[in-house]
Image (cartoon, rainbow, N blue to C red):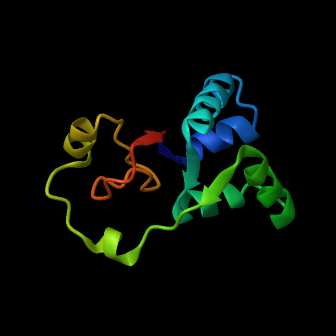
């Protein structure tokens, strides 16, 4: 299974968020055990902004085993035939309204962490 990871989950973990950090860490561990962790270009840029050095940022994502997965022009240009919530419901995952982590038009995505 491939899991798209939202900015908020990564920042919870990297920032040791006292409220959501542990739950986000556990969700990332479970997703990693189930397959690939993917970070879209928008989330990648949002998380990168929180690091002073590019090397440190890449090292942290590397330790997580997360890989860069940009949104394709074709995928982003396709009109959705239903709302994100409806598409997510059909796919059996949570809708993501931030960072475009759930690509409802791409059946290869099977989960999202938001």
Instruction: Give left or right: position of 3 versus 15.
Output: left
Instruction: Give left or right: position of 74 versus 39.
Output: left
Residue beneath the point at 62% across and 64% down: 45
Residue beneath the point at 76% across and 32% down: 16
Instruction: Give left or right: position of 41 versus 66.
Output: left
State the image coordinates of residue 72 (x, y, percent, origin top left).
41, 72
Check the image and name the residue furthest to the bottom.
73
Nearer to me, 51 or 31: 31
User: Is residue 3 placed above or below 94 in the rendered structure?
Assistant: below
User: Is residue 90 placed above or below 47 in the rendered structure?
Assistant: above
State the image coordinates of residue 34 (x, y, percent, origin top left).
55, 35
Q: Which quadrant of the view contains residue 91? A: top left
Q: Which quadrant of the view contains residue 55? A: bottom right
Residue beneath the point at 24% across and 36% down: 89
Q: Which quadrant of the view contains residue 29? A: top right
Check the image and name the residue furthest to the left.
81
Residue beneath the point at 52% across and 60% down: 40
Nearer to me, 66 or 19: 66
């Amino acid at each position: 299974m491939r899991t798209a990871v939202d900015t908020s989950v990564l920042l919870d973990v990297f920032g040791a968020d006292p409220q959501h950090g542990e739950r986000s860490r556990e969700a990332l561990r479970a997703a990693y055990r189930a397959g690939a962790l993917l970070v879209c270009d928008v989330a990648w840029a949002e998380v990168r902004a929180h690091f002073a050095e590019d090397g440190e940022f890449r090292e942290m994502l590397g330790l997580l085993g997360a890989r860069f997965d940009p949104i394709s022009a074709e995928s982003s240009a396709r009109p959705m035939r239903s709302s994100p919530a409806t598409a997510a419901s059909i796919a059996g995952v949570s809708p993501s309204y931030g960072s475009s982590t759930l690509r409802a038009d791409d059946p290869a995505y099977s989960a999202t962490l938001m």
